[in-house]
Amino acid sequence: MANPDDLKKLYLRTLSLLSIDNAKVRDVDSDELKTMGADSKRKDERIEALEKRQEDYDKQQVFIDKLSQEKDFRERYLDFIEKNQKNIS
């Protein structure tokens, strides 16, 4: 097993070599990167639209649940179905 003091000395000696202070940064740009960025943006927009649609469905479902629990509505709905059975089929 390695000696912790030796590891500490080795770490401190190599730490200065690991510094990024003098590193140079360059931008990478390619057609593939642009395509990936555009695809990602389209997917983000699609996900946002689907999330909005799901929120709308959730709101509608709450309304439908409340409505279906009302006795008067259920009776009127069942009467409507019964009277229009032929048209629905």
Image (cartoon, rainbow, N blue to C red):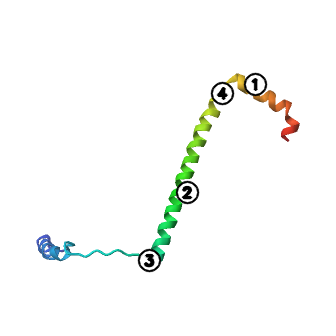
On screen, residue 74 above or below 35 = above
Which is more foreground, mark 1 or mark 2? Answer: 2
Which circle marks residue 67 in the picture? Answer: none
> Does the CB distance between marks 1 and 2 fall below 8 Å?
no
Q: Which mark is residue 30?
A: 3
Please determine whether, in this image, residue 12 is positioned above or below residue 46: below
Q: Which residue type does callout 4 highlight?
A: Gln
User: Which one is earlier in the sequence, the residue at label 1 or at label 2?
Assistant: 2
Rendered residue at 35%/74% (across/down): 27
Picture residue at 85% right of the left edge, 35% below the top:
85
> In the image, what residue occupies the spot 75% across and 24% down?
75
Q: Closer to the N terminus: mark 4 or mark 2? A: 2
Q: Position of residue 17 (x, y in %)?
A: 18, 77
How far, Cα to Cα, is label 3 from label 4?
58 Å
Q: Going by the picture, which residue comes out furthest to the top?
A: 72
Which label sits in the foreground, 3 or 4? Answer: 3
Disc 2 or 3, which lies upstream in sequence? Answer: 3
- Secondary structure under the numbered disc 1 in the rendered image: helix
Spatial separation of the CA atoms under disc 1 and disc 2: 40 Å
**Marking on residue 46:** 2
Which is in the foreground here, disc 1 or disc 3? 3
Type of amino acid at the residue the image marks with label 2: Arg
Judge whether 40 appears above or below 78 on screen: below
Q: Mark 1 and mark 3: span between their CA atoms?
A: 65 Å
Q: Which mark is residue 75?
A: 1
Crowding near pointer 3: few (<14 within 10 Å), some, many (20+)? few
User: What's the distance in space between the residues labelled 1 and 4, CA to CA?
Assistant: 11 Å
Q: Quadrant of residue 61?
A: top right
- Of mark 1 and mark 4, the one earlier in the sequence is 4
Outermost residue to the right: 86
- Local secondary structure at mark 3: loop
